[in-house]
Amino acid sequence: MAPAWGSADTRAAPLSRTHTHTHTHSPTHAHQPPPRTEMSDAYKAKLRKEYLSLGGSPNTAMGGNYFLYIIILVAVLAVITKLSGAI
């Protein structure tokens, strides 16, 4: 019979130890990422189409990282605002 809810004997049963740790963690057994494979032509075409739909140009390389520029700008403005005593 199971103990009543809230009784003093509500301990969990001990876990069984069925898995034994047999491998070692040495540099020779380090987990390597899977090898990179070439993208298929269909996937390249899909990415190119998506790039063009977002305003990219078909014959120019992708532009700079605009999100990084915005983050840097906001950080600089925050530092200037803090130094000027506005906040």
Image (cartoon, rainbow, N blue to C red):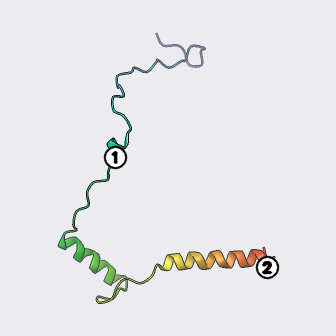
Q: In this view, does 18 lie above or below 27?
A: above
Amino acid at circle 2? Ser
Q: Where is residue 46 in the image (x, y as percent from the top left)?
A: 25, 75
SS under mark 2: helix
Q: Where is residue 53 in the image (x, y as percent from the top left)?
A: 33, 83
Q: Residue at 24%, 74% (x, y): give it.
A: 44
Left or right: residue 11 versus residue 44 is right
Q: Where is residue 57 in the image (x, y as percent from the top left)?
A: 33, 89
Label ID, residue 31: 1
Q: Residue at 21%, 66% (x, y): give it.
A: 38
Q: Which residue lies furthest to the right in this view?
A: 85
Q: Which of marks 1 and 2 is nearer the N terminus?
A: 1
Residue placed under numbered mark 2 in the picture: 84
Q: Look at the numbered discs 1 and 2 and tell me whether their residues touch, using CB distance below 8 Å.
A: no
Amino acid at circle 1? His
Q: Can you tell which of label 1 and label 2 is closer to the viewer? A: 1
Q: Position of residue 9 (x, y in %)?
A: 56, 13
The crowding category of the residue bearing disc 2, from other C-alpha atoms within 10 Å (few below 14, some 14 to 19, many at least 20), is few
Q: Residue at 23%, 71% (x, y): give it.
A: 43
Q: In this view, does 15 lie above or below 85?
A: above
Q: Nearer the viewer, residue 69 or 36?
A: 36
Q: Which of 7 and 27 is in front in this view?
A: 27
Residue 72 falls in image quadrant: bottom right
Quarter of the image that includes the C terminus: bottom right
Label ID, residue 55: none
SS under mark 1: loop
